[in-house]
Amino acid sequence: MFRRPIYKFLISFIFFTNSITAMADNHLVGDFSGNVTLTSDYSFRGISQTGEEPAIQGGLDWDSGTGFYLGAWGSNVNFGDGDETSMELDVYAGYAGSLDGLDYDVGFIYYIYPGANSNLNYDFWEIYGSLGYDFEVASFSAGLAYTSDNFGDTGDGLYLMSSLSIPVSDMISLDASLNYYDVEPGFGDDYWDWIIGATLSIDWFDANISYIDTDLSNFDAADSRVVFSISRSF
């Protein structure tokens, strides 16, 4: 899947991201940040995007300081389609803030799959929004993402999201999410997906282990599995 060893690619990406964010912070307004993740599987809405194989992921973000933000994020993928595409690139823009302790986020995201035949219609867009509140003993958020032109030109798609995070200590949190995907028959069946996990955060990286599952049957990419990831932000 990778043309060179994973650790070499990861080191190169960290160096590149550090360099870009440093140059951007020195020459442009707003704040730039980057992130890189190595994960045992790229799971998107409960479905493996890499055939349950490892993925290297990374992104760059710009925060205006006034609520408006822009970003890009990428990952390797493997849809078992004869290598029509081996990469996903997401570009997004939005506005986020907080009002009386209630966090909000609205935006637009475009999913791009370089190299895929245009007849496959892999590329698609979504608008999204979420609300969240930190109760100190736990934080909760809920949101949705909608498109009228879903993956594969399969019509409308509405994804309803909810998540809960409980801090156990300064370094450890327990996390859970329950989500529902309402899709057209061309995409498949409507389904639920859920995640239960834990995150360890220390000075320079975060480590996460999660159990992921869906209520889809007879679909190997949606089987239950345990995913481990390690990430770093810059």
Image (cartoon, rainbow, N blue to C red):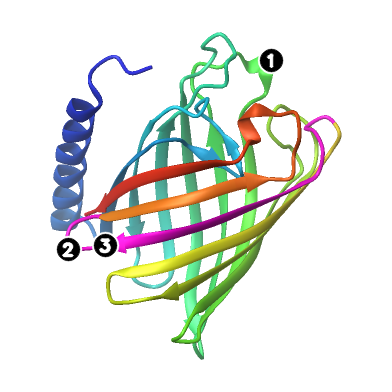
The residue singled out by tag 2 in the image is: 203
User: Where does the magenta region start and end?
Assistant: 186-205
Mark 3 belongs to which amino acid?
Asp
Residue in the picture at 33% in, 68% down: 172
The residue singled out by tag 3 in the image is: 31
Q: Are marks 1 and 2 in contact (CB under 8 Å)?
A: no
Looking at the image, is mark 1 or mark 2 earlier in the sequence? 1
Quadrant position of residue 171: bottom left
Mark 2 belongs to which amino acid?
Asp
* Residue 44 on the magenta span: no
* Residue 199 on the magenta span: yes
Residue lying furthest top: 82
Label 2, label 3: how far apart the Cα atoms are: 20 Å
Mark 1 belongs to which amino acid?
Asn
- Label 2 sits on a secondary structure element that is loop
Residue in the picture at 51% in, 11% down: 83
The residue singled out by tag 1 in the image is: 119
